[in-house]
Image (cartoon, rainbow, N blue to C red):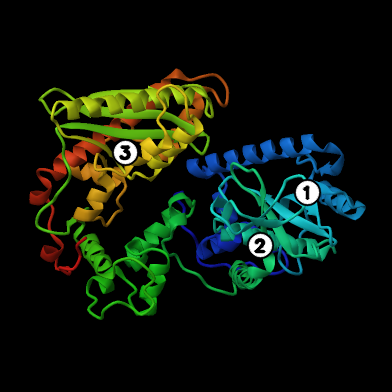
Amino acid sequence: MSHVVPPPAPASGPSVLIDASSLTRCRHRVYLDTAYRSLLVGTAEDTGVQLRREAAAAYRAEIRDTLVAADPQSWVVVSPSMSRSMQVRATRAACESGVERIWNATFADDEDAGRRGRCDMLVRDPDGGYIPVLVVNHKVTDPGSGAVTTPFTSWAPALDPTRKVRPQLRDQLAAVHVHRLLGRIGQAGVSARAGVIGFGAEVMLVHDLTAVETEYDTRFGDRLAIASGSVVTSPSKVSECRSCPWWSECGETLRRTRDVSLVAAGSRADALRSAGIVTIDDLADWTGGVPDEWPHGDFDETVVIARAWIADLPLVRRRDTVTVQRADVEVDVDMESYQEHGAYMWGTLLDRRDGAEPQYRAFVTWEPVPTMDEARSFGEFWSWMQGVRADAHAAGLSFAAYCYSRAAEDKWLLGSARRFAGMPGVPTEAEVREFIDGPDWVDIYIAVSQNFVCPSGKGLKKVAPVAGFHWRDDEAGGEASMAWYRRAVGYDGDVDASQRTRLLEYNEDDVQATRALRVWMDGAAAREIPTAEELGGSSSVTK
């Protein structure tokens, strides 16, 4: 957007309504969304936000169809094609009739309290009233024990010896929000519990809402006061900014005022302001030690980042020398996945370091994931890489495989081994674990973190350009590639082969970037990048 946000013009009266999403949203965005929503008309939605929203809607539809088909007589499905007022009346009628389960429950606005909302699903509470159930497109449990779960087919909460809760405060707060809306029409469950069906659902996670009611009341009161204009907010950088439609305005304000959140976002900025450190210049000149409320991260490093921001430096060296693991035979690896559905591509770059040009090779399936054809591409990738490794060792040469930020690759290596166990070329989980825990699997992200302070972030797209590497596609990025993939496999219509080429080039550029960064670190980096001490920072900024 190119417009400028005008001075505050508080909204007031019963028309100010808060939905559940506001409870975990940036406070300043709540104000802007309420007071100036009309300015967003015509603004394109962030691609990543759009894809996540569409994926969540598709997942909810999948769960709805599965559950309703299993026991259609126990359900009332409130059609979203009806007007909102008709959906409200249908929900109220279903509750009053005592039906066991209701899909797409929609509630009348509670203008007295300032609350509005809906719920994916309501389940009749055996003790009276209804229990809110959310369907979310993220994981809500992890392997472990201690979670309370219930089967889909009945409300029978019990301790689960195989699952532990994955904390998701936003889900709990949203459930309390619905519980309050149910209470307004006399239909709140007596037990004050809620269910959540997460991604890969096998059971429903059960939450005790009393555990978060105080937090809910605090947040709801705060957001309602902001929306009504009785509490003044100001911009501050948080993780949400990267996809926020107001960022152009907020970012301009923060840069003009040299706000400290540009180099220490979120709760760290709050702690700095509490200590009287308001601007980046305040932080760069700070000599008062670590602030009492400092939440996390190396404070000395944050001071160096502030000084680097002022000097417009993309990187700062932690020490005199720059070190990175090299090998006689090197393979760069970059995996591409589509949300949680599957890993469709394993891209590789083989560099034998013998003077020949590195060779790119992708192991890919173009069947829409999830598909059993992933087993073929994964098995071929693993067999090829381990063959290169074995040949190198047999020749007395060292070998290393490299990735950038290994969490995603590790996840899909292990997950694919479990999912496709016993299929041709697919390793056992133990074989994968032995490899990724060994010395031949190297994360260049860790090497960057050990050698440099990164004022603009440690992402490959941020760091590789310092080494002189640039992507062919100006739109290259993880979220953009999701949209390319949908067209490449025909999720939304005909297959667009050009998007397959685009994905292959993007993947090749990623592995080329990792190699370029490693080569640069092994050569020119120590000459080109100043140290923290040279910048005037603490000599303790080392790892």
User: Viewed as shown, does residue 428 lie left or right of 70?
Assistant: left
Mark earlier in primary sequence (1, 2): 2
Secondary structure of the residue carrying tag 2 is loop
Residue at position x 33%, y 29% in the image: 347
Closer to viewer: mark 3 or mark 2: 3
Report the residue marked by disc 2.
18
Report the residue marked by disc 3.
435
Closer to viewer: mark 1 or mark 2: 1
User: Quadrant of the rendered structure where residue 467 is?
Assistant: top left
Q: In the image, residue 55 lies at what x, y percent?
A: 58, 39
Marks 1 and 2, how far apart at CA: 32 Å
Q: In the image, residue 119 lies at what x, y percent?
A: 72, 52
Answer above or below: position of 521 versus 335. below
User: Quadrant of the rendered structure where residue 543 is?
Assistant: bottom left
Q: Which residue lies most toward the right here? A: 97
User: Viewed as shown, does residue 83 lie left or right of 248?
Assistant: right
Q: In the image, residue 428 lies at what x, y percent?
A: 42, 33
Secondary structure of the residue carrying tag 1 is loop
Q: Which residue lies most toward the left here? A: 527
Pointers 3 and 2 in contact (CB under 8 A)? no
Answer above or below: position of 276 versus 376. below
Mark earlier in primary sequence (3, 2): 2
Label 1 environment density (alpha carbons within 10 Å; few <14, some 14–19, many ≥20): few
